[in-house]
Structures are given as C-alpha cells and as structure tokens.
Amino acid sequence: MAPPSPDALGAGHGAPHDGGSVPTRCWLFFLPGAFTPVCTAELGWVDELAERLAPAGVGLRVVSCDSAAVLRKAADETGIRTPLLSDFWPHGAAARAVGAFNEATGRARRSSVLMDAVGTVRARIHAAAGDERRLQDHLDALPGEWSTGSR
C-alpha cells in the first residue's frame, strides 16, 4: 500500500496541507503524541534538521495521529516552523501505510521514514518507547547521492 501524500494529511493549522510545497524527497517524522516528554524534546530540534536537509532537497514533515487542533497548539507553544501534519482521520492511515503505526496503543511509533520522489522507502529510523531519535541519524541515513554536505 502506498502512503498517502502529505497533502492528504491535515495541517497543524486545521486546513489541508498545501501539496504544492511538498518536496519530492522527504522524511516523514512520526510522533506518538505531540505533548509527550520525548516528542516535545524531539520537536526542539526538528527545525535544525529541516535546515540541514534543505541543501540536499530533502524535506521534513512531522506527522502525528493527534488532531490538527492539538498540533496547532504544539506548534504555537514550541515555535517550530517545520510542518506538523495530522494523521487523525482516517486514524493513523499514513503511519499504517509505512509500517509506523502501533495497533496496541493507537498511535504512531517513534519512527522516521525517508521517501523518494516515487514513494519508495529509502531509509527508516526507529526509537524504542521512551527513547529519543537523534538528528544525526537522519543525516547519516541519506543515500550518498542526496548528501547535505553537513554529515
């Protein structure tokens, strides 16, 4: 099953995501919940990751099963600029499509999935419950031809 495009997900400000701004290569950065302690810590560095990925033409989209209203509050409170996309309804469809949904909890796993322009998964990063992913792991996982020059 192909994952839904980011424009099929709700933006953190309650409207459909503007598909015109979606990069052709993108990390989908799944959060179990925007206000959990580990997710809040990760939100503290996603803007830096997005800035470091940009020279390679790789985007970053944060995706959570939280509602768009919750994600808007998270964006407002943290001040992050990286798009927060809601996978609320159909609940977890994007996370399920890429194997990042935890059926037992009803939330996304703490996983990142790197997609290329045709929707092929190029890399995955997972962290155990309670553990934070690392910014550098996302840079190190980029295929060589996608180098950011900042590894």
Image (spheres, rainbow, N blue to C red):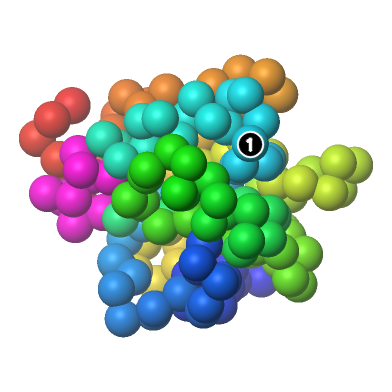
> Is most of the magenta stretch helix, strand or loop?
helix
- Hey, what amino acid is under mark 1? Phe
Q: Position of residue 12 (x, y in %)?
A: 52, 62
Horizontal placement of 46 versus 108: left or right? left
Q: Which residue is mark 1?
A: 35
Q: Position of residue 84 (x, y in %)?
A: 48, 56
Residue 32 painted magenta: no
Horizontal placement of 19 versus 39: left or right? left
**Residue appearing at x 18%, y 50% in the figure:** 54
Local crowd size for mark 1, using a 10 Å CA cut-off: few (<14), some (14–19), many (≥20): some
**Residue appearing at x 55%, y 51% in the figure:** 73
Task: Report the number of discs.
Answer: 1
Q: Which residues are magenta?
A: 50-58
| Residue 34 sits above or below residue 19 on the image | above
Q: Where, by quadrant of the figure, is residue 45 drawn?
A: top left
Horizontal placement of 129 versus 28: left or right? right
Q: Quadrant where the C terminus lies?
A: top left
Q: Position of residue 14 (x, y in %)?
A: 56, 71
Q: Position of residue 147 (x, y in %)?
A: 16, 41
**Residue appearing at x 68%, y 54% in the figure:** 66
- Say which of 21 and 15 sits in front: 15
